[in-house]
Image (tube, rainbow, N blue to C red):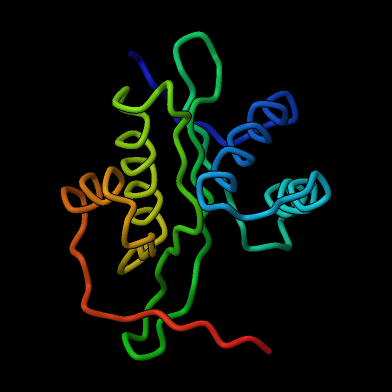
Amino acid sequence: MAITVVRPVESHRPAWEALYAGYAAFYAVAQTPDMRARVWSWIHDPGETVECFLAVAADGAPIGLAHFREFARPLAASRGGYLDDLFVDPSARGSGAADALFAALGDEARRRGWSVIRWITADDNYRARSLYDKVATRTPWVTYDLSP
């Protein structure tokens, strides 16, 4: 399957919404249309940090998404990219969409001079982790959330 990676445009919104809703459902996160509308607006606002790549099949249908943003790395005195969300439609898994999204992220990182692309995943997300283990190095860090 021929996959291209593009920045989303307005005509992609229904497919992006379906993909993002699928991502939220996978992680059992309650998500509303208003929440998706907010994220969509962030993606298209140059004043926001959230960006998006879509993996698009040969027929033009978006089949995967990656949300990412730049972050400062003070200890390394550098900038990195943080991959917030990566999702491929279950019917398109194994198509090369995730590989294409990672390749686009790598190209973006080199273009911007990022020193790392970082992300987290659920410990039991075995299928995704099998890919992640091929494209990146697992770290020994433990993640914490502090609720304000």
Quadrant containing the N terminus is: top left
Number of marks in picture: 0
Asked whether 63 or 33 is in front, the reply is 33
Question: Is residue 128 toward the left or the right of residue 21 in the image?
Answer: left
Asked whether 98 or 50 is in front, the reply is 98
Image spot of residue 26 (x, y percent): 51, 45
Question: Is residue 11 toward the left or the right of residue 1 in the image?
Answer: right
Q: Which residue is at 33% across, 52% downward?
A: 125
Asked whether 24 or 97 is in front, the reply is 24
Image spot of residue 19 (x, y percent): 58, 34
Q: Which residue is at 38% across, 53% downward?
A: 111
Asked whether 78 or 63 is in front, the reply is 63
Going by the picture, which residue comes out furthest to the right? 34
Instruction: Please say if 144 is above or below 79.
Output: below
Q: Which residue is at 52% across, 52% downward?
A: 27
Going by the picture, which residue comes out furthest to the top? 59
Q: Which residue is at 20% across, 47% downward?
A: 130
Image spot of residue 37 (x, y percent): 79, 46
Question: Is residue 132 toward the left or the right of residue 83 in the image?
Answer: left
Image spot of residue 87 (x, y percent): 47, 41
Quadrant containing the C terminus is: bottom right
Q: Quadrant of residue 93?
A: top left
Q: Quadrant of residue 13?
A: top right
Instruction: Please say if 67 is above or below 101.
Output: below
